[in-house]
Amino acid sequence: MEQRQQLLDKDLISKIKGIQFRARHLVDDAFAGEYRSTFRGRGMEFDEIREYILGDDVRSIDWNVTARMGHPFVKLFKDERELTVVFVVDVSASSNFGTVTRFKNEIAAEIAALLAYMALRNNDKVGLVVFSDRVEHYLPPKKGRGHVWTVIRDILTYPHQTEAKKTDLNAPLQFLNRVLKRRAITFLISDFLGAGFEQQLRVTSHRHDLIALSISDPREMELPNIGYIELEDAETGEALLVDTSDYLFSQDFKGRSTKQLKQQKDFFRANGIDLIQVNTAESYINPLIQFFKMRAFKS
C-alpha cells in the first residue's frame, strides 16, 4: 500500500510539473501581455480631487464637487500596487470526469496555472477556494512559484479526497464575500451542474470582478451509438439503463444538453458576468484568447 502511494505521488508530481511547464510556455508565447492589458488598468483606487486643468479627460470630472465649488474639479486615480486573483474551483464528483484525454479538474488546474503565472509575472497575489457542496479548502492569496505549485496540487487532489459528491455554488461564493474585504479578480471554475445559485452569483459579481469558466465534456452533450449502457449521475449516484441506438432518446438527450448550455450563456450575459466556455475535447487556448480580446475591446 505504501509503495502504491509513493507511485501515485510520483504520478501527481509528474503531472504538476507538466502543467507548470505548459503554463509557463503559454505565458511567454500566446498570452504575453494579455493579463496586464486586461486587468492592470482595472485595478484603480481613488487618489485625490483637484481643479480641472486644460487637457484633463472630461470623463473624470466630479460633477458634485464642481457644482458645489462653481468651477470644474476632477477625480484622480492611481493603479493599485498589486491585485488579488482568486480561483474558486469545483471539485465535486462531476469534476472528476472526462472522456477524451483529460478530466475536467485537470483542465481546471491547467487554466488556473496559466492565469496564476500571468498574475505572478505582474507581482499580484493568487488565492484558491476549492468546493463541492461546501468549502473544502482555502488558500489565502499570496505570491510565489511554490504557491502556484500548491494551487495546482490542490485542484488535482481534492476531487479524490472529498466524500461530497454534489455541487453548491452558494457556499464558496458566500465564503469568498466574507473573507475578502477588497475587490478581487475571481475566476469561478465549474461545470455549473447545480441549481439555485443565481442570486449569490449576482451579489458576488457586484463585489468582485467575477468571471465564470464553464467546463463541459462531449459525452455530456451527445451519446455515441453503442447500444444499451448504464448512465450514472456523478453527483446523485442515480443509475439509468438507456439505449443509445434509440434515435428519439439520443435527440432528446442532445436537445436538453444544448438547451442547458444556452440557458447558462443567457444567464451570465443578462447579468453582465463574463463567461468562458471550455470543452475537454478542445483546446482551452482559443476561448481564453477570445476572452482577453473581448475584455480589451470593452475597456
Image (cartoon, rainbow, N blue to C red):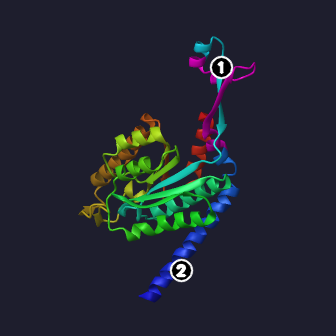
Instruction: Please indicate whether residue 73 sits to the left or right of residue 192 in the image.
Output: right
Q: Is residue 89 visible?
A: yes
Determine the secondary structure under disc 2.
Answer: helix
For the residue pair 127 and 71, the one nearer the viewer reads as: 71
For the residue pair 219 and 51, the one nearer the viewer reads as: 51
User: Which residue is disc 1 drawn over?
Assistant: 73
Where does residue 205 sit, x and y in percent of width and height? Answer: 45, 40
Identified at 37% across, 41% down, the residue is 263
**Whether residue 71 is situated above or below residue 134 in the rendered picture:** above
Task: Characterize the local packing of mark 1: few (<14), some (14-19) or many (20 or more) Cα atoms within 10 angstroms.
Answer: many
Q: Amino acid at mark 2?
A: Lys
Identified at 59% across, 54% down, the residue is 125
Q: Which range is magenta?
A: 37-65
Which one is in front in this view, the residue at disc 2 or the one at disc 1?
1
Q: Quadrant of the N terminus?
A: bottom left
Where does residue 129 sit, x and y in percent of width and height? Answer: 45, 57
Q: Amino acid at mark 1?
A: Phe
Does the magenta segment cover residue 206? no
Q: Quadrant of the C terminus?
A: top right
Chain-order first, disc 2 or disc 1: 2
Quarter assignment of residue 144 = bottom right
For marks 2 and 1, give the CA distance: 62 Å
Where does residue 295 sit, x and y in percent of width and height? Answer: 59, 39
Determine the secondary structure under disc 1.
Answer: strand
For the residue pair 101 and 206, the one nearer the viewer reads as: 206
**Whether residue 154 is situated above or below residue 265 in the rendered picture:** below
User: Which residue is disc 2 drawn over?
Assistant: 10
Does the magenta segment cover residue 46? yes
Return the mark for residue 16: none
Q: Farthest residue toward the front? A: 69
